[in-house]
């Protein structure tokens, strides 16, 4: 059980948020309403996705002050504290893509695309999304985002939503390992960029490491683990989702959550 | 030599990037255009003009959740309406003009704006909504056939204001009256309750977005019988360049020479 303690906690949080969204729509609960782009808590506090707001601003519309402030709050939380934690602790797509990742490992599915997609492909998508938003006058990623589609599939019963999510799942399962969250998703890319210097990070202790490689096996962003077995330091890459899978699979106590206060590259 | 090679690599890289951005952007843009290709769509009360609405709406669905009648729906891919934006189809469920405007009020992004339901400094009022305008196709409206119906007139939440009945002699029978529904565009909210109530197989009264249901005369026609409109002539004359012979231009049509020729 110790091997899954963070995983279980993450799923509880992700599913509870989903459940509250569903209850908001079906039972009229006011705890949490809206979606992952913009939500309102207990009918009073607006929270918004800073990347969605960025696209709206790029499209040429000055969003209302309530969503602007809501986006600023969220941005500060991840920039200062959480890093890319949205991905592993909040985002519902993470449940889907983690499942594909796990099935790949269980059934040893090794397929990879011929032209391997670079990990920083998502930053190009991120830049492109802002350009397309500006040119076409419409938040470009929001209109195709599988995250919003999954939310609509669950909360509003949208069939097309499930279809898009299924496509992402199949790509991850058969075409590219960690394809969506590890290479393509611009929201993950956004948080990777802005969350690089956040305080919560995974810390590696080389002296305890036995080079068993268990962490590499479970990490969807395995390049971020490059220091493992070589030097004792924080996992500094912004791409680390702080999911703590590496921490829980490590039998040698060589990885743990820690607080980072320096600003080294 | 080596630096030449790396430089070539860098240039190749940049070209690849540019090609990716270009084609990717075009495909992405095309995809957006196909998802917004529907000819028309009716938005919730207090919505910004379509172009700005599309920019502003964050697709959170809070307006949809707030609507007690399940009027509003979020568009899905394939609907031809920007994916995730709210709309309604009055023939299935119209907007019942809730006096507390829960949908407009719940919108966080400003895509639905209570200010657009406000007139002359008074508090927001749902009856100021302009979601569209009801239009009547006379040939399929039973009332215009001379059969008594009035379904839309009775259903309209702004009865006797948005729809009135005009009386006309039924020339065919020579002894009956036709009670004809007439929509008044200055009052009609576009709620579509009339469209839903229409007893015709395919509604003879239906809501179209304002830009699809309204015309525009243009500045060059003036209602000479309205003092305020008439004043526009003088205003326009003042605006015209002094060097031009404005007076003679105005008198051109009155000039007898035109007739003499
Ligand atoms: S990468 Fe994107 S889809 Fe994946 S968990 Fe992060 S935000 Fe969600
Ligand atoms: S390094 Fe660890 S915490 Fe970061 S993404 Fe990989 S498994 Fe998760
Ligand atoms: S005014 Fe009422 S019925 Fe009409 S869309 Fe808004 S919430 Fe629904
Ligand atoms: S509440 Fe506003 S931002 Fe949210 S879906 Fe409705 S119109 Fe769009
Ligand atoms: S849409 Fe029809 S029911 Fe609604 S205000 Fe206009 S005329 Fe009346």
Image (spheres, coloured by chain):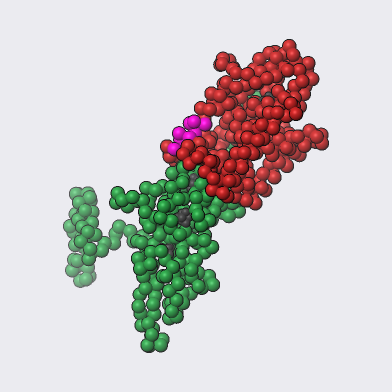
Chain colours: A red, B green
Camera-side residue of A186 and B21 = A186
- Residue A188 locus on image (x, y percent): 61, 32
Residue A44 on image: x %, y %: 46, 39
Residue A67 forms part of the magenta stretch: yes
Seen from this angle, which residue lies furthest top?
A: A207
**Left or right of residue A68, residue A146 in this image:** right
Q: Residue at x 52, y 61 (%)?
A: B93
Which residue is rendered at x = 19% and y = 66% of the image? B254
Please tell me whether residue B138 belongs to the stretch shown in magenta. Answer: no
Residue B16: % across, % down: 63, 32
Q: Nearer the viewer, residue B64 or A28?
A: A28
**Quadrant assignment for the C terminus of chain A:** top right
User: What residue is at 75 percent from the left and 21 percent from the top?
Assistant: A250
Q: Quadrant of residue A192?
A: top right
**Is B51 on the left-hand or right-hand side of A128?**
left
Q: Position of residue B106 (x, y in %)?
A: 46, 46
Quarter of the image for residue A150 reads: top right
Above or below, comparing residue B42 to residue B257 in the picture: above
Residue B1, above or below A99 = above
- Tell me the magenta residue range: A66-74
The answer to whether any part of residue B4 appears in the image is no
Q: Residue at x 73, y 11 (%)?
A: A207
Q: Quadrant of the N terminus of chain A?
A: top right
Query: Mainly helix, strand or loop, the magenta region?
Result: helix
Does residue A78 appear in this view? yes
């Amino acid at each position: 059980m110790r091997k899954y303690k963070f995983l279980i906690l993450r799923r509880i949080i992700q599913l509870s948020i989903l459940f509250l969204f569903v209850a908001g729509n079906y039972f009229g609960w006011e705890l949490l309403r809206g979606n992952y782009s913009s939500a309102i808590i207990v009918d009073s506090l607006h929270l918004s996705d800073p990347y969605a707001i960025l696209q709206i601003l790029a499209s040429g519309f000055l969003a209302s002050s309530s969503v602007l402030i809501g986006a600023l709050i969220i941005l500060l939380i991840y920039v200062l504290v959480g890093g890319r934690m949205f991905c592993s602790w909040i985002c519902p797509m993470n449940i889907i893509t983690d499942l594909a990742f796990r099935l790949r490992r269980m059934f040893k599915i090794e397929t990879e695309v011929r032209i391997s997609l670079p990990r920083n492909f998502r930053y190009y998508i991120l830049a492109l999304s802002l350009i397309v938003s500006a040119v076409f006058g419409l938040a470009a990623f929001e209109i195709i985002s599988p995250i919003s589609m999954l939310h609509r599939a669950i909360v509003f019963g949208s069939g097309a939503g499930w279809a898009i999510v299924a496509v992402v799942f199949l790509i991850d399962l058969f075409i590219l390992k960690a394809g969506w969250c590890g290479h393509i998703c611009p929201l993950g890319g956004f948080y990777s960029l802005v969350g690089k210097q956040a305080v919560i990070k995974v810390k590696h202790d080389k002296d305890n490491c036995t080079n068993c490689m268990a962490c590499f096996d479970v990490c969807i962003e395995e390049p971020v683990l490059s220091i493992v077995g070589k030097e004792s330091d924080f996992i500094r890459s912004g791409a680390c989702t702080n999911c703590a899978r590496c921490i829980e699979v490590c039998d040698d106590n060589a990885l743990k959550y820690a607080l980072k206060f320096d600003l080294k590259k | 030599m080596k630096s030449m090679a790396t430089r070539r690599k860098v240039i190749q890289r940049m070209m690849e990037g540019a090609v990716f951005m270009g084609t990717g952007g075009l495909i992405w843009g095309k995809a957006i255009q196909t998802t917004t290709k529907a000819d028309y769509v009716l938005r919730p009360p207090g919505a910004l003009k379509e172009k700005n609405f599309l920019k502003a709406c964050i697709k959170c669905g809070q307006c949809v959740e707030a609507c007690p009648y399940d009027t509003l729906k979020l568009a899905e891919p394939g609907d031809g309406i920007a994916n995730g934006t709210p709309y309604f189809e009055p023939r299935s469920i119209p907007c019942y003009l809730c006096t507390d405007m829960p949908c407009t009020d719940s919108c966080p992004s400003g895509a639905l704006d209570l200010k657009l339901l406000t007139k002359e400094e008074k508090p927001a009022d749902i009856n100021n909504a302009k979601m569209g305008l009801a239009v009547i196709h006379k040939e399929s409206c039973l009332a215009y056939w001379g059969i008594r119906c009035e379904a839309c007139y009775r259903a309209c939440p702004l009865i006797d204001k948005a729809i009135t009945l005009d009386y006309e002699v039924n020339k065919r029978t020579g002894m009956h009256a036709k009670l004809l529904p007439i929509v008044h565009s200055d009052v009609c909210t576009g709620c579509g309750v009339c469209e839903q109530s229409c007893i015709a197989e395919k509604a003879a009264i239906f809501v179209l977005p304002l830009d699809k249901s309204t015309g525009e005369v243009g500045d060059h026609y003036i209602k000479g019988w309205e003092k305020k409109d008439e004043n526009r002539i003088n205003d326009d004359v003042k605006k015209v360049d002094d060097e031009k012979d404005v007076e003679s231009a105005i008198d051109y049509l009155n000039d007898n020479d035109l007739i003499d020729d």
